[in-house]
Amino acid sequence: MIYLKNPLCLGMKESEYKEMLALGGMRQKHFEKNEVILSAGCTTHEIGLVLSGSVNIENLDLWGSKSILSNIGAGQVFGETYAFSHETLMVDAVAAQQTDILFWNLDILVHTPHPASTWQPKFIRNLLQISLRKNLALSQRQDGGIRLARAGGGENGMVVADLAA
């Protein structure tokens, strides 16, 4: 089953995937090039898995200039931070070409307890791994001007940013 070969389903059996599917927490949708998938200023409860095509994560600044922050290709996930936290999106997700997305409803799959399931802990672990990898990649992309230093005299090991450098 092709859907098992994605980062959200690592370590899952086909039967576990079918249990998730039976809950109605997934839907597939096609998008044309330049079609907005998720809009800044809105909220979402779904994450997207790119099945084919690609998605640009775009930011529009105060002067109306568009910046592409990242490109999400087939087999990659987007929107997980916003779907998990229910925070308002600060960016747009836009189809960079004809694109098929499998949406995963976190209200059903994560926020609703499924105590008898063996898939839910695996799904949450996989979601956390994806989010952590993205966070690390973003941290590694940050360059110049910000150096992390251990706060002097503190016992809590708090890390602060030295913006004056």
Image (spheres, helix red, strand yellow):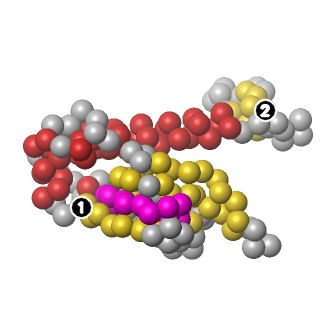
The amino acid sitting under disc 1 is: Gly
Q: Magenta segment: does it hold 97?
A: yes
Mark identifier at residue 25: 1
Q: Residue at x 50, y 50 (%)?
A: 72
Q: Residue at x 68, y 38 (%)?
A: 141
Q: Position of residue 143 (x, y in %)?
A: 77, 36
- Number of labels in the image equals 2
Mark identifier at residue 135: none
Contact between labelled residues 1 and 2, with CB atoms less than 8 Å apart = no
Circle 2: element type: strand
Q: Earlier in the sequence, mark 2 or mark 1?
A: 1
Q: Position of residue 56 (x, y in %)?
A: 56, 58
Is disc 2 surrounded by few (<14), some (14 to 19) or many (20+) residues within 10 Å?
few
Circle 1: element type: loop
**Residue at the outermost right position:** 164
Separation of marks 2 and 1 at Cα, in angstroms: 42 Å
Q: Which residue is mark 2?
A: 147
Asked if residue 90 can be seen in this view, the reply is yes
Q: Quadrant of residue 4?
A: top left
Q: Position of residue 55 (x, y in %)?
A: 50, 57
Q: Magenta segment: does it hold 26?
A: no
The span shown in magenta is 94-107
Q: Between residue 8 and residue 33, name the one nearer to us.
A: 33
